[in-house]
Image (cartoon, helix red, strand yellow):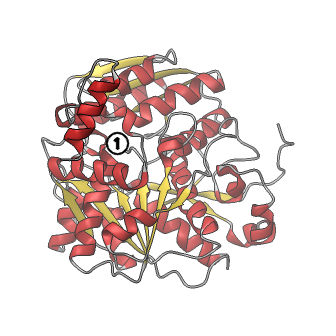
């Protein structure tokens, strides 16, 4: 492991609403106005430490941008996480009628095939610095897998809380690591409320509650990589799935940080949010021009990883979309399935339901003229389709079964060519 860095680039925490400063501690809510806390950096110090050249010489993982992440020194886990492919999707571009389309593919992120490995790597590294003994989370699936896997790697005991009706593959992909998995009767918002109580009573490091300000910063690496992989240029559009709303806010923050440090020219990227039609409070707020979103009491969608009716960062996701000049769209269950198949059939990428939502939203953004044919588009794929195979089970195409005889194959080929 590398030698510990002598200085931190983190100045402290700050309330996103009233601006009140806080020390670097496992805190997430302002005690005065109850606004969420965010990490504040010393960008002057970062500018002296970090250059394009410095980044390019480092190993291809998320920690190549470590000065822009909230850790003191070097991480405990995650040396294999990140720097996932940015794929130029020529077949999909032709299908969509857009000149330049890229897929940022975190469906192959290490070790649990989702972008959550980025945020969890930061959270567990920070939990180590804070000397916690147990890590935990409330999850709709992908986060459960990631916390369980990376906690095992870091030598932590872990407790994972999920809605009890999650996809079987995500349940298996959590318990296999030896995590304590606890199913809760009810949707994610009920799970999260319970976990907020547990975090206070048991003094555990809940990655998306009391460690949340640090955890969420890991999402920035998704955008940092896009810019670097595009040759240090920003795309015209990025389409992003939204559950709690954190990812899209951190993508926007990352782009602005690179602009602040002079790594890119003026950011002109429009960030667009995508949600499932059965749970789309942020999309509704954007479309109706609402300052505050209306929570969804009973989410109903096959995209369970996005089914958060009261998104913690929903207000800030709406602000990021508007500030960038972006837009938001939702997708029905049928459109989600069509989106999954479109990406698979054109680019050979099998995405989970969240990716189907992004694909369906992208189609609408293009159809409505928000994304134009001569602009650069990045589609965010954040999880692997192997985790949500159930949604396609009823849509499978029947296939022929023949005896191992050439005559039967010849007959079959005659049917194919008719």
- SS label for mark 1: loop
Question: Relative to 24, is 367 on the left or the right?
Answer: left
Q: Which residue is mark 1?
A: 352
Q: Residue at x 50, y 33 (%)?
A: 146
Name the quadrant containing residue 362.
Answer: bottom left
Depth check: 73 or 369 in front? 369
Is 145 rendered above or below residue 273? above
When the figure is inspected, residue 7 is found, relative to residue 133, above or below; the finding is: below
The vertical placement of 26 against 228, above or below, is above
Residue 230 locus on image (x, y percent): 59, 70
Q: In the rendered view, does 28 fall on the left or right side of 356?
A: right
Of residue 314 and residue 64, the one placed in the foreground of this image is: 64
Instruction: Tell me residue 175's x, y (percent).
Output: 44, 17
Q: Residue furthest right?
A: 3
Q: Residue at x 71, y 55 (%)?
A: 64
Can residue 312 be seen here? The reply is no
The location of residue 143, given as percent across then percent down, is 43, 36
Q: Is residue 253 visible?
A: yes
> Residue 33 appears in which quarter of the rendering?
bottom left
């Amino acid at each position: 492991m590398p030698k510990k860095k002598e200085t931190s680039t983190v100045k402290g925490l700050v309330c996103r609403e009233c601006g009140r400063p806080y020390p670097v501690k496992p805190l997430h809510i302002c005690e005065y106005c109850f606004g969420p806390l965010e990490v504040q950096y010393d960008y002057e110090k970062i500018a002296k430490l970090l250059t394009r050249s410095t980044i390019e010489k480092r190993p291809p993982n998320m920690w190549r941008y470590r000065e822009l992440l909230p850790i003191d020194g070097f991480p405990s886990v995650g040396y294999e996480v990140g720097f996932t492919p940015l794929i130029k999707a020529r077949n999909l571009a032709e299908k969509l009628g857009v000149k330049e389309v890229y897929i940022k593919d975190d469906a192959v992120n290490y070790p649990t095939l989702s972008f959550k490995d980025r945020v969890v790597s930061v959270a567990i590294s920070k939990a180590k610095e804070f000397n916690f003994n147990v890590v935990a989370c409330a999850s709709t699936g992908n986060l459960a897998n990631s916390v369980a896997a990376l906690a095992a790697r870091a030598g932590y005991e872990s407790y994972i809380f999920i809605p009890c009706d999650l996809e079987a593959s995500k349940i298996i992909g959590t318990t296999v690591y030896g995590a304590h998995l606890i199913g809760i009767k009810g949707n994610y918002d009920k799970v999260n409320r319970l976990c907020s109580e547990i975090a206070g009573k048991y003094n555990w490091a809940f990655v998306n509650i009391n460690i949340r300000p640090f955890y969420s910063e890991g999402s920035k690496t998704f955008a940092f990589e896009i810019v670097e992989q595009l040759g240090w240029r920003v795309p015209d559009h990025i389409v992003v799935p939204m559950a709690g709303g954190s990812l899209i806010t951190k993508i926007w923050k990352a782009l602005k940080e690179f602009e602040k440090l002079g790594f890119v020219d003026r950011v002109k990227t429009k960030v667009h949010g995508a949600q499932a039609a059965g749970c789309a409070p942020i999309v509704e707020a954007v479309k109706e021009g609402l300052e505050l979103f209306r929570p969804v009491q009973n989410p109903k969608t096959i995209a369970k990883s996005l089914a958060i009716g009261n998104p913690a960062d929903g207000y800030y996701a709406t602000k990021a979309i508007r500030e960038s000049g972006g837009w938001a769209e939702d997708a029905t269950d049928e459109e989600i399935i069509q989106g999954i198949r479109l990406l698979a059939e054109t680019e050979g990428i099998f995405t989970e339901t969240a990716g189907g939502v992004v694909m369906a939203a992208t189609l609408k953004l293009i159809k409505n003229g928000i994304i134009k044919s001569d602009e650069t588009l990045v589609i965010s794929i954040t999880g692997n389709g192997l985790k949500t195979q159930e949604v396609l089970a009823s849509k499978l195409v029947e296939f022929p079964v023949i005896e191992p005889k050439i005559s039967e194959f010849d007959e079959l080929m005659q049917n194919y060519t008719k």
